[in-house]
Every structure is written in C-alpha cells, then in structure tokens.
Amino acid sequence: ARKFMRKYGIPAVLATRPDNTRYLTGLRGPEFMPQLWYVLFFAEHDPVVFAHAGWDKQMPADAPWIKHWRLARSWLGGIGGPAVTQEEGKLFAADIHRELKERGLAGEKLGLLAMDGVARESLNELGIKTMDFWPVMLEIRATKTVDEINCLKTVAAMCEAAWHKAWETIKPGVYDNELSRIAVDTLLRAGADDTGPVAWRTGPLTFDRGFDRPGRMIQTGDLAYAAMCGVQYLGYRSCNYRTFIAGRKPNAKEKDWYKQVVDRIDAIIDGTKPGVSTADLATFFPPASKWGYKDELEVLTMEVAHGIGLYQYEYPVINRQWSLKHPQILEEGMTFAVESREGREGEGGVRMENMVVVTANGAEILDHFPRDEIMAPPG
C-alpha cells in the first residue's frame, strides 16, 4: 500500500470496510453497521486506528503492533436524525483534520476508501482535499503474496469439505435450505471465519437465476448448484460453483450443457499466463446473443472471471462486456475465479466455477473438488 501511495503522491488514506482495514492493519473489528471503525493510514507514518466503543478499550492489548488508538465516531447510518448526523460528521472530520495537521498533511490529498457521503462532505467542509482511493486499492491488491495465495488455497479446501457433504446429502425429499444449513455447518467445522449463505438453486430455478433457498423440496432428476462464494479464511474469500443431480445420472442433454461450460472455463484457464490480455481470454466466452440476449449486461457476473482476495470482486476482470474494449494484462500472482453456466429457461441448467492463480508457468487451479462432470449420487 505504501509503495503505491508514494507512486501516486497520496500521503494518507482513510479506510473503512473489513477488506480494506484488514489489508492495511491486520485487524478485525465490529462490522454490524457500516463505518463503525476506520483507519487513517500513512505512506510515511504509523497508522492511527479509530476503534468503536468497547473495542477501543480491549483491542490495544490484543494488537500491540498498532501504536496509535483513538475512539471512532459513527452516526449509525443517520438513525439519530439529520441534526445528529451533521453534528457527528463535523466532530469526525475535526478528529481527522487534527491527525493530519499533526503530521503536516492538512493541505495534502486524502484518499477515501468506502467512507459514506456524510464523511466526505464533512471532510471537504474543513478544507480537506479528498479523492476516491478504491481504484488505487484495486491496483495494490491485484497481485497476491505467497501467504495470501495460501489463504485462498485454504478456503478452497474448506469449500471442498462442504461440497463433499452436499454430494452425500442431495437426494429426493431434501429441501434446498437444509442443504444450505448443512454446508454452513460443515464450513464452520472446517475452520471458516465466515460462510455467507451458501445459496442453493434447484430444479427449474437453476437457469438463469432468481430466488435462492426458497424452501423447495428436491425431486428425482433435479439439477442443483450452489454458490460457495464469500466463505472466508483470515478474510480471504472463496468463489466457486459445482453442479449436482438428484436420484439419477445426468442425461445426454444435461451432459452437453455441462461440457459446454467446462470447455469454456478450461479454454480460459489453459490460455492464462503472465502477459496475456484479458481481451484475448474474453473471446472464449460466447456472446450474449447465444441465449437470445441483446446486451452483454444480461450475463454480467454469470459469464465472467473476476479477481478474488479480501473482496469478492478485485482485479482482473474477464468478460465480453468490458475486456474487449478495456483489456487488462495478467501478472504472476493474480488470483481470479472463472465461471459459466448453461441451460434452458424454466427447465433448468448447470453452473461451474474454478478459483485460479496466475503462475510463471500458467494457471494453477486452487479448488480441487471434482469438476469434470455433473456430480451424480454416490454409488
């Protein structure tokens, strides 16, 4: 972070949201409301952590690598009314201005990460020049260290445990929301920090997509898939899909759907290496017109590869909507998830996703649960 702050001449950053604060300080904090705590991070000074009520008393002993602690101000989303929000905003901005002034930075640019409009306006009213730091943060986090990659490998292994349990459980008579409960329980037992909902779609709800976990009973021949997305280990997030079938083997049509998906994903994985353009890889996704759609927007987040890390969507992105016109160049250490789906509206479909890391020799797949065919019932 300091390297890129110096590169762009940004001496200070004010950050909230757990992916940002954890990256900059290694800390976890209260997240039951947005912006309860925040970090003032410097290119040339030690960071200042503004901790939420209660946390400000306990965390200094738990995190001795942070030297400067302050009490954070929060307007709790404005629930006290406009007057309270405005008052707290002014006090918040005064606290930040004081820290900047002590370091001779009151007249310099302050990058903002995930701070709301009240924070920005309050800082601007005190003459603090603010800028959106998120594009820089995406650049900072684009390539991962060995430790970060190992965190992603670990969370992928936790997902494998949940996929295996789901494979053992899926059968006629089981409800989709029961599958979610079982998957979440398995992930927590495996050591996940957080799991997300593990949202299942089954039967005719598997293409394209809509409500998940509606309490639907699985029947013989139903296709089923889940998003194991947002499972966390030390904050690093998974994003992978697998497809199952209940009570029978897949038929020729279902096998063909799935083969199309795997072939697309494999083409992107096989073409991945440092120096390759995302525009080249995006051509392996079919145009939206394949499904009768008029705009690539209609397959956004479905026919895509997206960076993964402490946030669910980071650099790089690979899709036909953006990559052909605005390509990015892959670098060693980038990590992303590549996903695709196929099927027929109202009838059902299949979906698959792999997590990969760009290495000097190509792409290494991080999640190892079987993915070459639809997972049929055991035995």
Image (tube, helix red, strand yellow):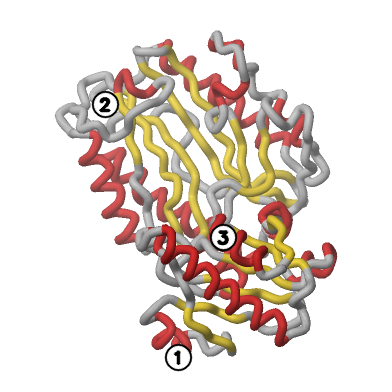
Q: Residue at x 43, y 63 (%)?
A: 83
Image quarter of the N terminus: bottom right
The three-letter amino acid code for the residue at tag 1 is: Ala
Looking at the rendering, which quadrant does residue 187 occupy?
Answer: bottom left
State the image coordinates of residue 53 (x, y, percent, origin top left). Answer: 39, 79
- Vertical placement of residue 53 versus 80, above or below: below
Q: Residue at x 28, y 43 (%)?
A: 180
Residue 184 appears left or right of 16: left
**Element type at mark 1:** helix
The three-letter amino acid code for the residue at tag 3 is: Met
Q: Which residue is mark 3?
A: 115
State the image coordinates of residue 203 (x, y, percent, origin top left). Answer: 30, 21
In the displayed orientation, state which residue is furthest to the front: 83
Q: Which mark is residue 61?
A: 1
The three-letter amino acid code for the residue at tag 2 is: Ala
Q: Which residue is mark 2?
A: 246
Residue 332 appears left or right of 295: right
Mark 3 or mark 2, which is nearer to you?
Answer: 3
Q: Is residue 290 visible?
A: yes
Mark 1 or mark 3, which is nearer to you?
Answer: 3
Whole-Å distance between the Cαs marked 1 and 2? Answer: 52 Å
Whole-Å distance between the Cαs marked 1 and 3? Answer: 27 Å
In the displayed orientation, state which residue is furthest to the top: 292
Return the disc, 1 or 2, that comes first in the chain's sequence.
Answer: 1
- Vertical placement of residue 24 versus 243, above or below: below
